[in-house]
Amino acid sequence: MTIVDFLDPGKWLRPNGGPRYVQLRQRLSDGVDQGVLKAGNSLPPEREIATITDLSRVTVRKAIHALAEDGIVIQKQGSGSFVAPGTPQIEQSLSRLTSFSEDMSRRGMASTSVWLERGVFMASPDEVLALALSPDASVSRIARLRTADGKPMAIERASLSTEMLPNPLLVETSLYEVLGQAGLRPVRALQKISAINLGDGNAALLDVEPGKAGLRIERTSYLADGRTVEFTQSIYRGDAYNFVAELRLAKE
């Protein structure tokens, strides 16, 4: 379908459908979702859209501005408006304990990491509490930016006792792979998920605008004998992850 056919007002513009710029915004958004307007491609000029839809250029400009505010298009001074690059959408089960690398591999996506921190440090009060350590204990920390098919997806900051991970430099890709080789792969975990607005630092790492929605996830994982393995604090892009949990009716 051509963009002229898709924007034919007889197919979507309704007298009682609300403000015209809102209807046009929705039609253009549908065009992105349906692949009529492809990621990275430019939108037709405002004048052309106005001619096709028989709407004023003011109406067209308001619709495109609304799309830009939603992050669907990117406006470049002197170059026009472009469909924003697509972000991988990940559906993550809350009932399965896997690593980021394993999740991406299962989906056929290439995962990479940018190291932010890796070494042995004195444990913080939060780490002492979460890992059940003595106040003067040391911990191995690994912090990295995780990407999927080249797109920044999450910031992971994991802390482990040096008993579980004596040398954090052993972790090159998958932490769980290293733990598994030592017979210390966790078998269960507790997670706490909360909604946040991304601050400047995290937003810059995740390549989104400051203030965008994100997810903070704290995970504490355990061995079969009850010992704590890891305490991980992660920040995920809110526009890239859908967390899914299966619920069953409780027996009375």
Image: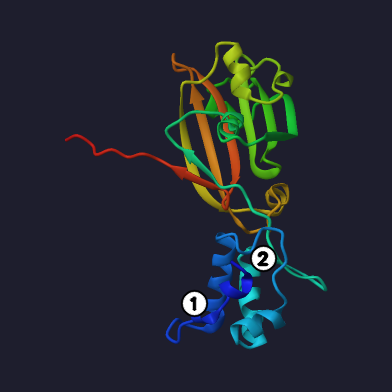
Q: Residue furthest right?
A: 78
Along the viewing direction, whichever of 155 and 147 lies nearer the viewer = 147
Of mark 1 and mark 2, the one earlier in the sequence is 1
Q: Is residue 119 left or right of residue 17?
A: right
Residue 186 in the image, given as x and y percentages of width and height: 51, 20
Along the viewing direction, whichever of 199 and 29 lies nearer the viewer = 29
Query: Type of residue at label 2?
Result: Val
Residue 206 in the image, given as x and y percentages of width and height: 68, 48
Picture residue at 71% right of the left edge, 83% below the top: 47
Q: Is residue 71 above or below residue 109?
A: below
Query: Type of residue at label 1?
Result: Lys
Picture residue at 16% right of the left edge, 35% below the top: 252
Picture residue at 61% right of the left edge, 19% below the top: 177
Q: Is residue 252 left or right of residue 150?
A: left
Label 1 residue SS: helix
Examine the image and state in which quarter residue 124 appears. top right
Q: Is residue 152 left or right of residue 27?
A: right
Q: Is residue 123 above or below residue 3?
A: above
Q: Is residue 13 above or below residue 6?
A: below
Look at mark 2 in the image and give the residue it sits on.
73
| Neighbourhood count class around disc 2 (C-alpha, 10 Å): few under 14, some 14–19, many 20 upward | many
Quadrant containing the N terminus in the rendered view: bottom right
**Which numbered circle lies on residue 11?**
1
Along the viewing direction, whichever of 243 and 44 lies nearer the viewer = 44
